[in-house]
Amino acid sequence: MSGKTAVVLGGGVGGVVTASTLRRMLPKEDRIILIERSGRHVFWPSLLWLMTGTRKVQDVQRDLADLRQKGIDVLKGEVTRLDPATRTVYIGDEVLQGDALVVALGAELAPERIPGLAEAGHNFYTVEGATRLYEALQTLHEGRVVVLIAGVPFKCPAAPYEGAMLIDHLLRKRGVRGRVEVAVWAAEPAPMGVAGPAVSQGVKDLVAERGIAYHPSRHVSRVDVAHRRLQFEGGDEASYDVLAVVPPHVPPAVVQEAGLTAPGGWVAIDRESCETRFENVFAIGDVTGVMLAMGKPLPKAGVFAHAQAEAVARTIAARWTGRDDEGRFSGNGECFIEMGSGVAGFARGNFYAEPVPEVKMFRPGRHWHVAKVAFEKNWWRTWF
Ligand SMILES: Cc1cc2nc3c(=O)[nH]c(=O)nc-3n(C[C@H](O)[C@H](O)[C@H](O)COP(=O)(O)OP(=O)(O)OC[C@H]3O[C@@H](n4cnc5c(N)ncnc54)[C@H](O)[C@@H]3O)c2cc1C
């Protein structure tokens, strides 16, 4: 009987998969603690369907307390401090120590970094913002919708483009698309650039085919809320009636203060084991920064957080049970690209391939949309 404790920080994609996989792999004498400040788990890809009215708030989230029946100690609370050298976690006044720590705290959304953005825009990277965006789109009869990518990096490289295409489809269904312009203004030079020029061009074409204007490499500096105008570095301006926002993403302060980060602020890890420079302290998912040979970081995506979580759980279980089969994250990933009207695209590949990732985009079709819906269903069935 080992009687060890694994402390998993964050109840998002990476945290839930790590805790549940560890629970399956370890004897019941070992304790698995999962700490999450919101107390809920959100399946983020479904937010795109929340903003188009095909999901309700209750469809996209679950109470993490449900995991207690599986033998996971779920703790609702904010991790306020972290000492990786002693593997100690502080949740306010409560102190916990683990034999292994898994940091899966994600990326913080920081709309307040751009003056006016928080008041003006619907941040569709939150449940509340996606809900409000749906309401705003329902009452729009003419004017302009802008999808704004306010900074890089941001999670799910496809999501803003999927968002724009789903908005296009919703407005067509409502019969108002002829009177509403849709545009994407992006802080990045091209969509899904890490996946390579073919995928990037493929996404650009999909957006263009729907009459959605695309303005890349535009860094928003301010929003004039009263006049509903966006101001960009270099002098460009754009007006909007409905503003759908992907806000700037920043690393959580707690990991920076813990000395876990590399320049840029994201947590530095070994790209295959996901271990930090502290033994038995791992980090996975959006909180990490992994630089690829091509000179760009591994995108922030649930598919990677998921695979990293499984690899880390396997490593911890191997170390604690004396097995010789530690986990490794391969860099493989895939992504659906929702387009509206029940059609989606799909891209898959290896992001660790050198000198550049090898990613292929498949021809869009109904079957990819059906597969994405099945993936969502399977998510809840598997993890809750
Ligand atoms: C609209 C949208 C669509 C997306 N679609 C896709 C998709 O189709 N495919 C895909 O692969 N990815 C997609 N993603 C990205 C994916 O959701 C993220 O990359 C993934 O959730 C990352 O997992 P994570 O565990 O690293 O972080 P998260 O899932 O964000 O979890 C981090 C958790 O930590 C908690 N936390 C943070 N700080 C603290 C603290 N101090 N104390 C306690 N708890 C804390 C947070 O509340 C959060 O629950 C999408 C994202 C969005 C927003």
Image (tube, helix red, strand yellow):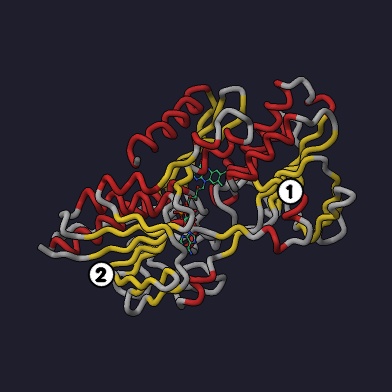
Q: Position of residue 195 (x, y in %)?
A: 54, 47
- Closer to the camera in the image, 265 or 198: 265
Give the residue displayed 45% in from the left and 71% down from the top: 92
Q: Is residue 326 left or right of residue 211?
A: left
CA–CA distance between discs 2 and 1? 43 Å
Q: Which residue is mark 2?
A: 99
Contact, mark 2 vs mark 1 (Cβ under 8 Å): no
Q: Is residue 26 left or right of residue 270?
A: left
Determine which quarter of the picture holds residue 145: top right
Give the residue displayed 42% in from the left and 73% down from the top: 93
Give the residue displayed 84% in from the left and 30% down from the top: 142
- Tell me if I can see residue 201 in this picture: no
Decide: few, some or many residues near mark 2? Use Cα within 10 Å; few <14, some 14-19, many ≥20.
Answer: some
- What element does badge 2 sit on? loop
**Mark closest to the chain's N terminus, 2 or 1:** 2
Q: Position of residue 164 (x, y in %)?
A: 68, 37
Residue 94 position (above or below residue 375): below
Q: Is residue 12 left or right of residue 50?
A: left
Residue 216 position (above or below residue 367): below
Return the mark for residue 121. 1
- Closer to the camera in the image, 307 or 330: 307
Residue 343 position (above or below residue 286): above
Q: Is mark 2 within 8 Å of ligand 1?
A: no
- What element does badge 1 sit on? loop
- Tell me if I can see residue 243 in this picture: yes
